[in-house]
């Protein structure tokens, strides 16, 4: 069954949005994960109509975050941008925004991490008003400088746990967390704060830092163990496939969907 399977738009980056929605519906999917840059050309309200017409629901909106800034004015501008993200998510009908927290600003790692926590605190009231959850995504440590100063699930939970469990939680992405020796214990701790579960594989050798993610089964990750642990922690939401890889992007979307569904059923789906 593929009731919980969701196509994150990054997996078929070059597939136009209308065709993406049509392809997901034709393949029997019920969910799609959207990215703001693909929504913007159509407008949020129009995309919401397109999603409903296709019989789909939006699993997550990517992405919020990127809080750190060299100046206080820059940080405040980033907070305001995140308020816009929340409003877009609510209009699209999703209750989950993925937060990619942002890299080092001004050469100060600790200050940047403090700015992330402060930024989340600043947008929590609006998130609660809109009924949108904030899913902090810890990224692999190789992205600390430019994409996320939050690089472990422990760090993400330490921030999330400052806020109500129904408002701030985490995204579990296998690509970013498979290596962490604490992961199995921490998934249990995360429990109801797991708001999003994303999957793709770690290729060996890794062909590219950003664009080297693989289709499930092409790398080294034990997806069955991950899925079992996430479900045991209480997660019952969509399972998104998110792949950054030029070879995948250059493959026709229908073929990517067919492969994705096959690998999901064999390697990822709940038993």
Image: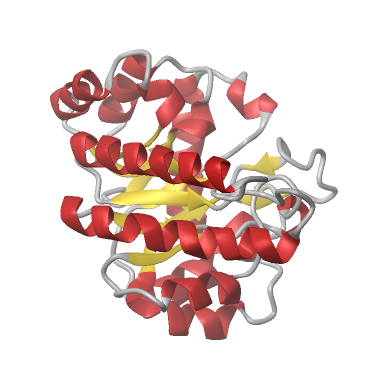
Frontmost residue, 210 versus 129:
129
| Residue lying at 60% horizontally and 43% vertically, measured from the top left | 215
Q: Quadrant of the C terminus?
A: bottom left
| Residue lying at 32% horizontally and 51% vertically, measured from the top left | 96
Q: Pinpoint residue 238: horizontal percent, then vertical percent.
A: 33, 53
56 vs 1, left or right, is left
Classify 193 as above or below 256.
below
- Snapshot colouring: secondary structure
Q: Pinpoint residue 116: horizontal percent, then vertical percent.
A: 54, 59
**Residue at the farthest right position:** 205
| Residue lying at 62% horizontally and 36% vertically, measured from the top left | 244
| Residue lying at 43% horizontally and 78% vertically, measured from the top left | 190
Q: Visible in this render: residue 250? A: yes
Q: Pinpoint residue 23: horizontal percent, then vertical percent.
A: 34, 23
Frontmost residue, 39 versus 54:
39
Q: Pinpoint residue 220: horizontal percent, then vertical percent.
A: 71, 59
211 vs 32, left or right, is right
Q: Visible in this render: residue 173? A: no
């Amino acid at each position: 069954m593929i009731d919980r399977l969701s196509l994150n738009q990054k997996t078929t980056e070059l597939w136009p949005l209308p065709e993406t929605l049509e392809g997901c519906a034709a393949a029997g999917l019920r969910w799609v994960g959207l990215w703001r840059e693909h929504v913007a050309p159509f407008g949020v309200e129009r995309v919401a109509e397109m999603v409903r017409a296709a019989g789909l629901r939006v699993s997550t909106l990517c992405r919020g975050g990127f809080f750190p800034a060299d100046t206080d004015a820059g940080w405040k501008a980033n907070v305001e941008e995140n308020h816009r993200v929340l409003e877009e998510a609510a209009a699209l009908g999703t209750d989950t925004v993925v937060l990619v927290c942002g890299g080092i600003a001004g050469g100060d790692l600790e200050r940047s991490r403090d700015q992330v926590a402060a930024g989340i605190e600043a947008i929590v009231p609006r998130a609660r008003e809109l009924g949108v959850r904030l899913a902090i995504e810890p990224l692999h440590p190789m992205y600390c400088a430019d994409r996320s100063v939050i690089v472990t699930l422990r760090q993400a939970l330490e921030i999330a746990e400052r806020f109500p469990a129904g408002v701030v939680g985490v995204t579990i992405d296998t690509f970013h967390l498979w290596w962490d020796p604490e992961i199995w214990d921490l998934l249990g701790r995360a429990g109801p704060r797991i708001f999003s579960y994303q999957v793709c594989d770690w290729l060996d050798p890794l062909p590219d830092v950003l664009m080297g993610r693989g289709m499930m089964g092409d790398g080294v990750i034990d997806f069955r163990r991950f899925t079992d642990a996430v479900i045991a922690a209480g997660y019952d939401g969509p399972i998104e496939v998110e792949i950054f890889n030029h070879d995948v992007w250059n493959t026709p979307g229908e073929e990517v969907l067919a492969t994705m569904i096959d690998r999901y059923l064999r390697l990822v789906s709940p038993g």
